[in-house]
Amino acid sequence: MSRRSLADRDIRKIFKSSSSYCMTIPLEIIHALKWKEKQKIKVKKVKGGFVVRDCPPGRAITRKVGKK
């Protein structure tokens, strides 16, 4: 498999694994944030996209169900 050009490095695809949708995060970003495998993160929907943040330690993740 060939590497992406520098201009296309930040372009990612969404893929489905079982019943979840997934995407890869560039390794450079993972290292810069000092994230580890199986680390808990928070994903929040914002206008035009979403934000991914580290989950504070010792804090339970609750699932909010939006109104339809």
Image (cartoon, rainbow, N blue to C red):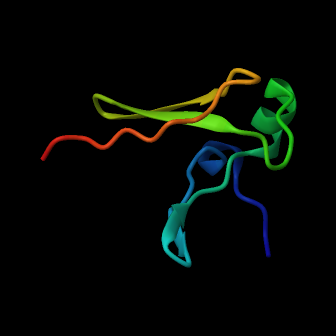
Query: Which residue occupies the foreground of this view, 68 or 20?
Result: 68
In this view of the protein, which residue sits in the foreground, 4 or 17? 17
Furthest toward the top, the residue is 56
**Where is 13 relative to 60, above or below?**
below
Percent position (x, y) of residue 16? Answer: 52, 73
Residue at (79, 70) in percent of width and height:
2
Please count the marks in the image.
0
Q: Residue at x 86, y 40 (%)?
A: 36
Q: Nearer the viewer, residue 25 or 64?
A: 64
Above or below: residue 57 compared with residue 37:
above
- Across and down, in percent, residue 11 comes to 56, 50
Quarter of the image for residue 54 reads top right
Near-viewer residue (29 or 2)? 29
> Is 60 above or below relative to 6?
above
Q: Position of residue 55 (x, y in %)?
A: 66, 27
- Left or right: 18 as drawn, with respect to 50: right
Residue shown at 28% from the left, 28% from the top: 47
Is 47 on the left-hand or right-hand side of 13?
left
Q: In the picture provided, is 56 more to the left or to the right than 46?
A: right
Where does the image place residue 13, in percent across and percent down from the top left?
53, 61
